[in-house]
Amino acid sequence: MRVFAALLLFPVMAFAAATPQKLRSEIQKYGEAEFSEKISSDDWKTALDNISSGQNEWISLAPDLAPVINQQQAEQLSEALYYAIAPNAKEALDTLAILDKHKYKHQQGSVLSCVSPLNQPQEEMMRIYNETRLALLDVPGVESATCLWSLEGWMEQVKQEDASKTNK
């Protein structure tokens, strides 16, 4: 009997899974005023995880999310887009170019997404930085060069701050 009940619930649970289409539908339904409050934490985490891992259909959701998210979500989205550069630089840069063309209340596009977050241990941050740097070198174009310039400048600043802490 329990197996039967579980089988009955499976289609509902599978249907409820977050997808880019589901989130676009929720954006349409709730709009700027309510989306950031209505999205479930599980759906938001799913979106961020899939964007971070470089999945095209999720990365391309970012311009739809940008006008309807709050400040905290915007920071999380910027970080996810940074992590998306290493596995999928072309799609991430194309999406950042779209974000850069608009003025959103909280989302800042490549200004933040091309610099490494500092919330990782030093070794992990350097590993991700190196992967991101190499990915950017493989993509021709102004967006890639600009992002790489921002990333390199940020890392030089981090290195100088670390060196000054060591010399104290």
Image: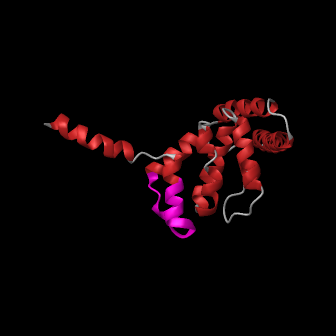
Q: How many marks?
A: 0
Residue extending furthest toward the left: 1
**Dominant secondary structure (helix, strand or loop) of the stretch shown in magenta:** helix
Q: Is residue 33 left or right of residue 38?
A: right
Which corner quadrant of the image does residue 68 belong to? bottom right
Which corner quadrant of the image does residue 14 belong to? top left
Rendered location of residue 32, percent (x, y):
57, 67
- Residue 85 in the image: above or below residue 45: above
Task: Tell me if residue 158 can be seen.
Answer: yes
Q: How is the image coloured?
A: secondary structure
Residue 25 magenta-drawn?
A: yes
Toward the viewer: 56 or 88? 56
Q: Is residue 79 left or right of residue 90?
A: left
Quarter of the picture containing the N terminus is top left
Range drawn in magenta: 24-41
Toward the viewer: 118 or 108? 108
User: What residue lies at 18% left-to-right and 37% top-to-bottom?
Assistant: 4
User: What residue lies at 75% left-to-right and 43% top-to-bottom?
Assistant: 165
Task: Tell me if residue 115 can be seen.
Answer: no
Rendered location of residue 16, percent (x, y):
39, 48
User: What residue lies at 84% left-to-right and 34% top-to-bottom?
Assistant: 140
Which corner quadrant of the image does residue 105 belong to? bottom right
Q: Is residue 21 left or right of residue 6?
A: right
Residue 69 magenta-drawn?
A: no
Toward the viewer: 120 or 25? 25
Rendered location of residue 51, percent (x, y):
59, 42
User: What residue lies at 68% left-to-right and 43% top-to-bottom?
Assistant: 82
Residue extending furthest toward the bottom: 33
Rendered location of residue 31, percent (x, y):
54, 66
Quarter of the picture containing the C terminus is top right
